[in-house]
Image (cartoon, rainbow, N blue to C red):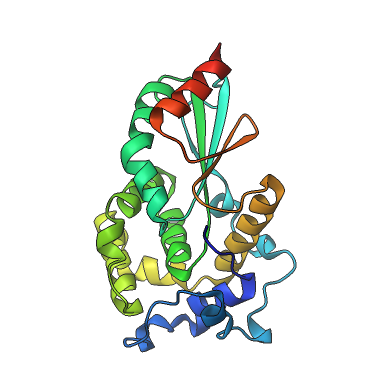
Amino acid sequence: MAQKLALAALVAVVIAGGAWFATQRDAGMATSTGALLGAASAETAAPTDAAAAVDPALLADRSMGNPDAPVKMTEYASFTCPHCANFSETVFKDLKTNYIDTGKVYFTLREVYFDKFGLLAGMMARCGGNDRYFGFVDTFFNSRDQWLNSEDAAVITDNLKRIGRTGGMSDEQIDACWANRPLANALVEQFQKNMTADGVEGTPSFLIDGVKFTNMSYEEFAKVLDDKLQ
């Protein structure tokens, strides 16, 4: 089960001065809460209402399908989570074809940030615009083993930038997005609030019409959905 990180600590290692990654060419990827907490300070604490300083469109849920579909499905996923990537590659495509694209299910993805790279990916996908968002999501999951395959933080962020360029973003747009500390604060605050409210503790996790499920095979998901649709 993935571990939770404190808001201030996570934002600290992502945003610090807007130049942290450029100066940490030899830093290894943080793999524990303690490693990330070590970068926190009183100055990095998020405001009580971080979302107040951010364009609401950047914080809105990202969804696909017919909003009036009879079944609502929400996935909680981290872009660095191997089980989430496996779900995307082996289950989600069939769910999309058979349930989302046919108007039976309205699907929402809620990002979970257990590490700085998942947060950077989420920020970039959102800054890229609604029409690019799920394209970025597919790329993050389908190429996870490639862009995350390094112990050098700078290499991983360079890989993410390459994905951003392929998706039509400039380096300047990506840098400005990643330097947006209010956005980082608000996204992490939002994810923590949502996960707590829904009782989610690991990824991927799912809500189907408000009922929580853990990861399943396509056949198991299909049975749950078909029962709901009867």
Q: Decide if residue 100 is in sight here.
A: no
Is 115 located above or below residue 23 in the figure? Answer: above
- Is the C terminus in the top left, top right, bottom left or bottom right quadrant? top right
Is 31 located above or below residue 106 in the figure? Answer: below
Furthest toward the right, the residue is: 48
Residue 164: percent from the left, percent from the top? 31, 60
Judge left or right: residue 91 versus residue 45. Answer: left
Judge left or right: residue 76 versus residue 120. Answer: right
Is 78 located above or below residue 98 in the figure? Answer: below
Residue 202: percent from the left, percent from the top? 55, 53
Judge left or right: residue 168 versus residue 95. Answer: left
Is 167 located above or below residue 109 in the figure? Answer: below
Residue 14: percent from the left, percent from the top? 49, 75
- Which one is nearer the viewer's eye here, 78 or 215? 215
Q: Residue at x 41, y 49 (%)?
A: 84
Q: Residue at x 69, y 61 (%)?
A: 52
Residue 147: percent from the left, percent from the top? 28, 64
Q: Residue at x 31, y 69 (%)?
A: 171
Q: Decide if residue 157 is in sight here.
A: yes
**Number of dots carrying numbers:** 0
- Which one is nearer the viewer's eye here, 167 or 121? 121
Q: Residue at x 62, y 49 (%)?
A: 200
Judge left or right: residue 23 versus residue 191. Answer: left
- Which one is nearer the viewer's eye here, 108 or 224? 224
- Which one is nearer the viewer's eye here, 154 or 203? 203
